[in-house]
C-alpha cells in the first residue's frame, strides 16, 4: 500500500488507514512494535509531522499505544475499534 500524494485525502489519514489495514490483516500482531517514525517517513515518503499525526490518530482510535522512549506498539485486540 502506498500514499497517493495527488489524492485530496490528507496524507496523515492515508498513512493511518494503511497502518490500520496492516494491523487488521495481521501484518502486525498485538503488542508488536511498529516501525520507527523515520522508517515510516522513508517508506511512505511523508514528513515526520505527518507520521506523528497518523500515529496520534491511531492511538485515539485504539489501534496503537505509544510508550515514550520505547516506540509505538499494536494495542491489545480488545482495544481495537469495533467494525
Image: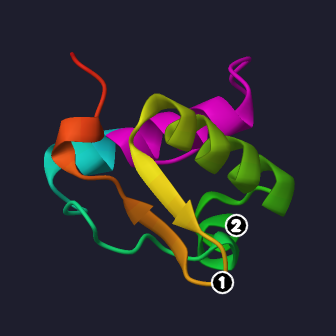
Residue behind mark 2:
41
Residue in the picture at 68% in, 20% down? 9
> Residue 19, percent across and down?
42, 48
Residue in the picture at 49% in, 74% down? 35
The quarter of the picture where residue 66 lies is bottom right
**Start and end of the magenta stretch?**
1-20
Residue behind mark 1:
69
User: Circle 2 sits in a helix, a strand or a loop, which is it?
Assistant: helix
The reply to whether residue 57 is in sight is: yes
Instruction: Choose the circle earlier in sequence order: 1 or 2.
Output: 2
Task: For label 2, count other residues whose C-alpha is less than 10 Å away and answer few (under 14), some (14-19) or many (20+).
Answer: some
58 versus 66 height, above or below: above
The reply to whether residue 5 is in sight is: no
The quarter of the picture where residue 60 lies is top right
- Seen from the viewer's position, the closer of residues 79 and 23 is 79
> Residue 77, percent across and down?
18, 45
- Seen from the viewer's position, the closer of residues 37 and 31 is 31
76 versus 5 height, above or below: below
> Residue 18, percent across and down?
44, 42
Left or right: where does residue 5 sit relative to residue 36? right
Amino acid at each position: 500500500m502506498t500514499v497517493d500524494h495527488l489524492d485530496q485525502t490528507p496524507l496523515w489519514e492515508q498513512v493511518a488507514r494503511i497502518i490500520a489495514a496492516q494491523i487488521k490483516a495481521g501484518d502486525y500482531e498485538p503488542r508488536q512494535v511498529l516501525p520507527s517514525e523515520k522508517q515510516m517517513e522513508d517508506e511512505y515518503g511523508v514528513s515526520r509531522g505527518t507520521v506523528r499525526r497518523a500515529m496520534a490518530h491511531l492511538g485515539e482510535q485504539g489501534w496503537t499505544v505509544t510508550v515514550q522512549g520505547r516506540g509505538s506498539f499494536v494495542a491489545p485486540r480488545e482495544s481495537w475499534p469495533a467494525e
